[in-house]
Image (cartoon, rainbow, N blue to C red):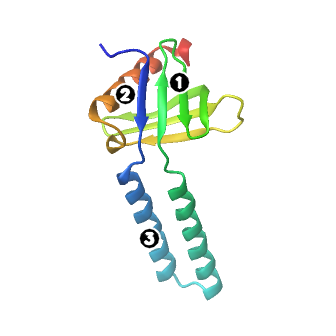
Amino acid sequence: MFPQPLIVEIRPSRQLRLGAALLHVAAGLALWLADLTNGVLVGGMSILIISLAFLSDHFQPLKLRGKTDGILEICNNEGCSQASRCEVGILAPALILLHYQPSGQSYISHLIVLPDSLPDMDFRRLRAWLQWQRSNPEYI
């Protein structure tokens, strides 16, 4: 089986960055082609540019530590925090969507993990750990 605890390092995904950029370009093109006034067009394009800059700033490496007691820790540049609540939104062979609430925080964070974010074996280990956590509701 896999060594415990689960420790994986998630790098920024090129596929996710490219997908976000293409969606912003498509939205900008739709704004450009729509019959809008210049003020609305400039405002919409400004919002898209700010949104893209905001998204590109949030692509940072993370380290996930899944403990044998079912607790998930998320570590970034600011330190580590336990996820007081962790739910798996999507657990597919090519995508993991994770919703978690950092301990002591009132907001829910979302983590999208694509296969190019980490080595194949680590992606497989993370999927297996999340599937195990999902099948054991006392750990959630």
- Ranked by sequence position, the earlier of labels 2 and 1 is 1
Residue type of the residue flagged with mark 2: Arg
- The residue drawn where x is 60% and y is 70% is 47
Q: In this view, does 1 lie above or below 8?
A: above
- Towards the viewer: 110 or 78: 78
Q: Mark 2 points at which residue?
A: 127
- The residue drawn where x is 28% and y is 29% is 121
Q: Is mark 1 on a helix, strand or loop?
A: strand
Q: Mark 1 points at which residue?
A: 72
Residue type of the residue flagged with mark 3: Val
- Towards the viewer: 115 or 39: 115
Task: Name the quadrant of the N terminus.
Answer: top left
Measure how far apart labels 2 and 3 are at the Cα level: 32 Å
Residue 25 circle label:
3
Residue type of the residue flagged with mark 1: Leu
Residue 98 place in picture, x, y as percent: 49, 35
User: In front: mark 2 or mark 1?
Assistant: 1
Residue 31 place in picture, x, y as percent: 51, 77
Measure how far apart labels 2 and 1 are at the Cα level: 13 Å
